[in-house]
């Protein structure tokens, strides 16, 4: 089993805005197999020493350095913590705070020391959460199932959710529309199914209110299209599970859901790349690092794609967004692309952290702007 805990949007915004005399960001691969976790603990110890060496080279205050070292050493010694892991781990520490996030996505071992955190691997994990709801809907049954990246799927209790179409319409069967209706045709059946779909949607509203978690519909025709026509949940995916859910167990639904999510995320990236190339002709798409940094600083970025593998050390001016590159990573610089992504998020932009092969024109950053420049 994977134990995953990635930050929420408010948490990531708070992390982006964190500033301290020393911010240590450590990312390392881990394993959910407890018998092999010793290797991850050893690696964490090595990366911790790398971070402390970088701080020592800058003449960092020894008392503050000792506080940071104590916090990281305490984490390294916590058997219960290391026993419950996923595929990668983020440790974000200052002399006063320490946060950890376990991720289902893989990472390259990384140490960054600066006055702010390095967050790009977390952005990647947030973009691909593998968490969704599935509405298994047929004339015979209605179920809402929650699918997790790290836990078995579980049915969600939904008050007032109809047990079936017959229950919602007060008829023995929606296949007999003449029962008290005088509508002996398919149109009569459709009206009964519409009534059923509306009751299902109404029951889901208080359960899903305020969420952005994808909802995947498992249904066949004609009920599937009918439900889509009345659904009020904005995160209902266009892609669904076309098989009848009547005989699908919760694990069956979870497996089908993960395939839908993988396709959904792949299409998101392809659509972003297509939009980028469309906006180039409108002077609303750029890849130059300096230009993207300025646009992010002034809140002009609408959508930002960043290369998850690229790290460019340097600094970005707080007022005009000009980039000063550093010869190598160290405690006096930080990851420029990460800083650009943070500024874009704080101005309301959407950020996609993707693999190098998915970047437009192979650039380390690509921005779609809110207006022409």
Image (tube, rainbow, N blue to C red):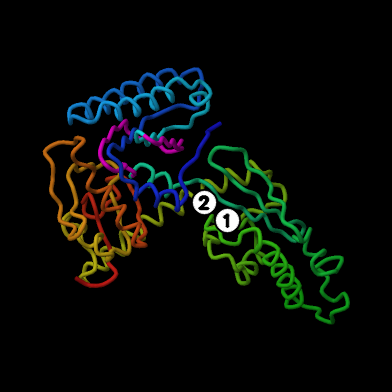
Quadrant for the N terminus, please: top right
Task: Report the magenta residues as a range.
Answer: 96-119
**What distance separates the C-alpha of mark 1 from that of mark 2?**
8 Å
Residue 206 in the figure: left or right of residue 166: left
114 in the magenta segment: yes
Picture coordinates of residue 199, whole percent (x, y): 73, 67
Give the residue at x 80% y 80%: 183
Picture coordinates of residue 284, whole percent (x, y): 24, 68
Q: Nearer the viewer, mark 1 or mark 2?
A: 1
Quadrant for the C terminus, please: bottom left
User: To which residue does mark 1 refer?
Assistant: 216
Q: Quadrant of residue 121?
A: top left
Q: Looking at the image, do the residues carrying marks 1 and 2 touch, with CB atoms under 8 Å apart?
A: yes
User: To which residue does mark 2 refer?
Assistant: 260
Q: SS at mark 1?
A: strand
Picture coordinates of residue 349, whole percent (x, y): 35, 61
């Amino acid at each position: 089993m994977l134990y995953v805990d990635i930050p929420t949007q408010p948490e990531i915004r708070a992390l982006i805005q964190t500033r301290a005399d020393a911010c240590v960001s450590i990312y390392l691969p881990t394993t959910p197999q407890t018998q092999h976790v010793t290797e991850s603990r050893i690696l964490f110890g090595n990366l911790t020493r790398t971070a402390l060496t970088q701080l020592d080279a800058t003449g960092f205050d020894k008392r503050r350095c000792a506080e940071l070292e104590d916090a990281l050493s305490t984490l390294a010694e916590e058997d219960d913590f290391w026993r419950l892991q996923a595929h990668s781990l983020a440790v974000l520490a200052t002399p006063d705070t320490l946060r950890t996030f376990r991720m289902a996505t893989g990472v390259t071992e990384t140490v960054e020391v600066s006055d702010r955190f390095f967050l790009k691997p977390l952005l990647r994990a947030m973009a691909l959460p593998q968490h969704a709801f599935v509405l298994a809907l047929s004339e015979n049954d209605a179920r809402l199932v929650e699918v997790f990246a790290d836990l078995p799927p579980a049915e969600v209790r939904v008050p007032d959710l109809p047990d079936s179409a017959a229950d919602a319409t007060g008829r023995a069967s929606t296949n007999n529309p003449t029962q008290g209706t005088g509508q002996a045709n398919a149109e009569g059946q459709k009206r009964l199914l519409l009534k059923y779909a509306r009751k299902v949607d109404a029951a889901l509203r208080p359960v899903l209110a305020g969420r952005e978690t994808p909802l995947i519909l498992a249904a066949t025709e004609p009920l599937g299209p009918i439900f889509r026509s009345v659904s009020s949940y904005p995160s209902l995916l266009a892609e669904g599970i076309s098989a009848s859910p009547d005989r699908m167990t919760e694990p069956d639904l979870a497996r089908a859901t993960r395939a839908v999510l993988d396709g959904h995320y792949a299409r998101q990236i392809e659509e972003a790349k297509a939009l980028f190339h469309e906006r180039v002709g409108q002077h609303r798409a750029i890849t130059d690092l300096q230009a993207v940094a300025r646009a992010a600083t002034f809140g002009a970025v609408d959508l930002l794609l960043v290369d998850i593998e690229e790290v460019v050390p340097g600094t970005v001016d707080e007022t005009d967004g000009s980039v000063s590159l550093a010869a190598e990573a160290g405690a006096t610089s930080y990851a420029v692309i990460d800083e650009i992504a943070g500024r874009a998020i704080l101005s309301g932009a959407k950020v996609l952290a993707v693999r190098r092969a998915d970047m437009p024109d192979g650039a380390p950053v690509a921005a779609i702007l809110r207006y022409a420049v």
